[in-house]
Image (cartoon, coloured by chain):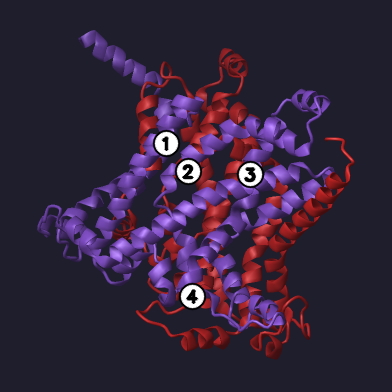
Chain colours: A purple, B red
Amino acid sequence: MVAARVKGKSKFRSQIHYYIMAAPGMLWLFLFSIVPMAGIIIAFQDYVPKSSLFQAIASSPFVGLENFEYLFSMRESRRVITNTLIIAGAKIALNLLIPLMFALLLNEVRSRRYKRIVQTVVYLPHFLSWVILASIILSIFGYDGVVNKFTGIFGKEPVVWMGEPGIFRQLVVGTDVWKEFGYNAVIFLAALTGINPTLYEAASIDGANRIQLVWHVTLPGLLTTIVLLLVLSLGNVLNAGFDQVFNMYNPMVYSTGDILDTWVYRIGLTKLQFSLGTTAGLFKSAISFVLISISYLLAYRFADYTIF
Amino acid sequence: MIKSSSIGSKVFNGFNYALMALLTFSCLYPLWYTFCTSISDKAATSAGLVTFWPIGPNLRSYQEIMRDSAFFNSLWISAQRTVLGTAFTLVVIIMLGYALSRKKASFASRNAFMWIVIFCMVFNGGTIPWWMMMKAYGLMDSVWGLVLCGSLPTFNVILVMNFFRNLPADVEEAAVVDGAGPWRILWGIVVPCSLPVLATVTLFVSVGYWNEFFQGLVLSSTQAHYPLQTYIKQLVVNIPQGQSLSREEMIRITQLSNRGLNAAKVFITMIPMLLIYPFLQRYFISGIMLGAVKE
């Protein structure tokens, strides 16, 4: 046993440089990811703020699952969960479908130069923040904005686009797809180059036309990628995109546009209901955690996909 | 790639080229529109007349910004945050990524550390506990607070680690024979061989810091501490978040603001992104391929 301890110690000593290399990163994770997780306790307390956070947590009474019961009894929370699921679900489906279609169509463009220019430009919105894009979108869709000018040509009355609960979700999903389609298409475009060209030649000799080639050669070649991306997006079911909605919404569209994350922000950080905010946040984190774990497991089982 | 010259094929090609042109236009128009608004005459912008061409072009908005100390203050905060944050994060990621790329035989805690990283990637405590802890750490109103508060970008660590693992092992072995220690191998051999992935990560991390607005919002006690995106958010996208808002109020709010000046500020905020991304394009494509996962 003593020998084993000595051996362990000398092993540690001979590997110490790796521990030193890992230390800053692990410390950063510990202080800024793991320690805040301990704050989840507040979800099970009736939290009363005090000047010191630790004193406040120590002295606040535990209430079991009362916060969760209260959360799910609220009409507002059911509304935001529904909104979140609708927006996130639509984003998952369309952020897969539209980039796929775009990649297929771009692949049919024969001029290499044209292809390159298109590809370079459509990445651009991905790199701009939602603050910037929302400011432009609010302006373009504003009451005297370009969109109303355009529809005005056809004699339509101007619309307050950002104030219509019936249109808001479509606007959110549509602008998100617009922002990301170029970037999301990259992975399909790369997969397309991996398809064996002799398959196309063989099919052409057999008399396949362009549509048949896409259907019988291209799509089967992309199937693994499509399924993999779909599985991996499972973890985003409760992720409707805080940055975007927070910068685009307003009280007129809370009924359809308010999502879990924006609601947590308002009840927690502007109305200072810390326990309720933490509870709602934990609800989201826990479900997302389970879904992401399942999706990684599925991806590993069926596609041999591992992230590490 | 496919030779076919039927009429249907030609019609499709025409349609396809037009569609691609339209999509390209849709991604450029918002920028052009913002630029046109920023150099247009004040009367024209407040009447909402600018659509595709600048009206009465002038540089008054940009001259006005020159005297706007709040804008420059926020710009300076964002610049510091981006430069310090990217440099710091990159060093941390390289070191941790290298340690994690070792086999368990040469780094005994490798798997345990790996699982901690993965766990932090897929689970978080939520916004409220995070915010309370940042306040408890005393990170309000500081640039280093804005650098550190987002925690380690775990996804990028995995990207770098995977790249390091796929480097050919014999170069390192030769270096060991020549007597190079682990630090020397990391900075002298591994890092110079990994420029593509490091360029990708630099792009991801710096874009992340530059574009971040929420942490700046909740970790600043006054507007004087806002980074640029938060400043823009408060200035341009600021719609009152009260309980009710009428249609008339909403129209009035959008018409009140100084559109030309705001557009100029938005345009300046976009410039760094416009400058860097075309150059790093060929790198980040490989970066996306390495990790098909989105956070």
Residue found 47% across the figure and 85% down from its top: B247
| Place of residue B187 in the rendered image (x, y in percent of width and height, measured from the top left) | 58, 31
> Of residues A254 and A24, which is closer to you in this image?
A254
Q: CA distance from mark 2 to mark 1?
A: 8 Å
Q: CA distance from mark 3 to mark 1?
A: 21 Å
Q: CA distance from mark 2 to mark 3?
A: 15 Å
Q: Residues within 10 Å of mark 3 (few under 14, many from 20)?
A: many
Determine the secondary structure under disc 1: helix
**Badge 2 and badge 3 in a common chain:** yes
Residue found 57% across the figure and 37% down from its top: A226
- Label 4 resides on the chain identified as A
> Of residues B260 and B113, which is closer to you in this image?
B260
Residue found 23% across the figure and 60% down from its top: A71
Quarter of the image for the N terminus of chain A: give it: top left
Foreground mark, 3 or 1, reads: 3
Residue corresponding to mark 1: A295
Residue found 16% across the figure and 60% down from its top: A56
Residue contact at pointers 2 and 1, CB within 8 angstroms: yes
Determine the secondary structure under disc 4: loop
| First reached walking from the N terminus: tag 4 or tag 1 | 4
Residue corresponding to mark 2: A233
Q: Residues within 10 Å of mark 2 (few under 14, many from 20)?
A: many
Q: Is residue A171 left or right of residue A12?
A: right
| Place of residue B120 in the rendered image (x, y in percent of width and height, measured from the top left) | 37, 41
| First reached walking from the N terminus: tag 4 or tag 2 | 4
Residue corresponding to mark 3: A100
Q: Which amino acid is tagged 4?
A: Glu
Foreground mark, 4 or 2, reads: 4
| Place of residue A25 in the rendered image (x, y in percent of width and height, measured from the top left) | 42, 39
| First reached walking from the N terminus: tag 2 or tag 1 | 2
Q: Which amino acid is tagged 1?
A: Ser
Q: Which mark is residue A164?
A: 4
